Amino acid sequence: MSKVYDVAILGGGPAGLAAGLYASRSRMVSVVIEKAKWGGQAATTEELENYPGSIEHTTGPKLIDRMKSQAEAFGTELIKDDVLAIDPTGDIKTVKLANGEIKARTLIIATGAQPMLLGAPGEMDFRGKGVSYCATCDADFFTELEVVVVGGGDSAVEEAIYLTRFADKVTIVHRRDQFRAAKSIIEKAMKNEKISVIWDTVVEEIYGDGIVEGVKLKNIKTNETTDFRTDGVFVFVGYKPFAEFAKGIVEMDEKGYIITDENMRTSVEGIFAAGDVRKKLLRQVVTATADGAIAATIAEKYIEDKFHS
Ligand code: NAP
């Protein structure tokens, strides 16, 4: 019979890497599968001021590198592949990948979330030509230029601050008259002279000639529309869970977030979920790693009870 892992962890962000670390430390044979960038969203974050112990000089990519090497040092296998489907039937579960399949006694789904689109005309046409969803990836293209940031959550306000290191002017366009970001982040942004805010306003269209040249804005209180010149549009209007392959298998909420109990157990025995893909209140690196640790620990108990008692 081909190799059977104790735990296959789907997704290599903070939740998945923490699960890998905990699994291998308890001597479970474990693998983490990541299709794109190790670290997911955390790897696109420059500052991690709210991750305990990382007040200075800890960028997302640096922290993720350390998480990866720590998990590997204890024996977790890390592979790059795309999860296409899971088959949960039976004691041994199957993960169908773009390049083969993997068998495991337990699965931990830690596939995170992906950026939501604005849905405005022009957004797709100018993707990569002025429209971006990742400030740390693209900010330097906008050195000494002017950019618009759309959204009012932690991502929008935090990334607006980051963008001021490069751009001359950053205008946050938010659909309401107050941010939902954490107060400390808002205070920092409001003190930054390069940042201004246009409240109660949505982006109706992104336009240009080959590259972004401007946006059409609409004030939702007055219905007035204006043209606003900009070189770039950074969209931070939230994230949606990335777990299509588990639809109809594990219980999800109406938005597609996986429902678990406090021990990360999903509705299917032997399948756990951890991190941003899970229905929960606080989606941050600190809660993702905690989820991963819990999921791996409970997976071990499950294996112990099911296969060794
Ligand atoms: P979020 O908290 O869901 O905020 C999305 C923002 O986009 C909201 O302000 C929302 O407006 C706005 N929005 C949604 N759809 C829109 C549309 N179609 N047009 C215009 N605006 C729209 O998303 P997020 O900021 O990406 O954060 C996601 C999660 O990650 C949160 O739990 C957040 O706390 C966490 N996070 C934490 C940190 C940190 O701790 N440093 C950093 C980044 C993210 P309304 O306010 O009107 O709903």
Image: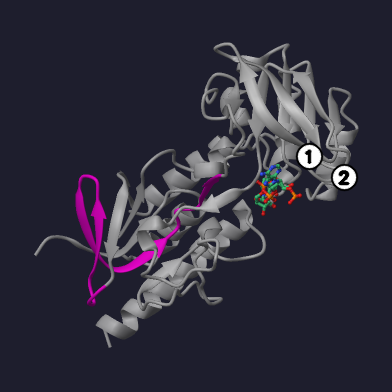
Farthest-out residue, front: 223
Residue 296 visible at all: no
Q: Is residue 234 left or right of residue 85?
A: right
Q: Which residues are magenta?
A: 89-115
Indicate yes or no: mark 2 CB to ligand 1 under 8 Å.
no
Do the residues bearing badges 1 and 2 touch, measured as CB atoms within 8 Å? Answer: yes
- Pointer 1: residues within 10 angstroms few (<14), some, or many (20+)? many
In this figure, which residue is indicated by the disc labeled 2?
177
| Residue 234 in which image quadrant | top right
Farthest-out residue, bottom: 309
Give x and y (percent) for residue 106. Answer: 32, 69
Give x and y (percent) for residue 292. Answer: 49, 62
Give x and y (percent) for residue 279. Answer: 57, 66
Label disc, if present, on residue 246 of the rendered structure: none
Q: CA distance from mark 1 to mark 2?
A: 7 Å
Q: Secondary structure at mark 2?
A: loop
> Which residue does the image show at 33% across and 80% down from the upper left?
304
Residue 89 visible at all: yes
Q: Quadrant of the N terminus?
A: bottom left
Q: Is residue 133 left or right of residue 25?
A: right
> Which residue does the image show at 58% across and 26% down from the upper left?
122
In this figure, which residue is indicated by the disc labeled 1?
174
Q: Quadrant of the C terminus?
A: bottom left
- Pointer 2: residues within 10 angstroms few (<14), some, or many (20+)? few
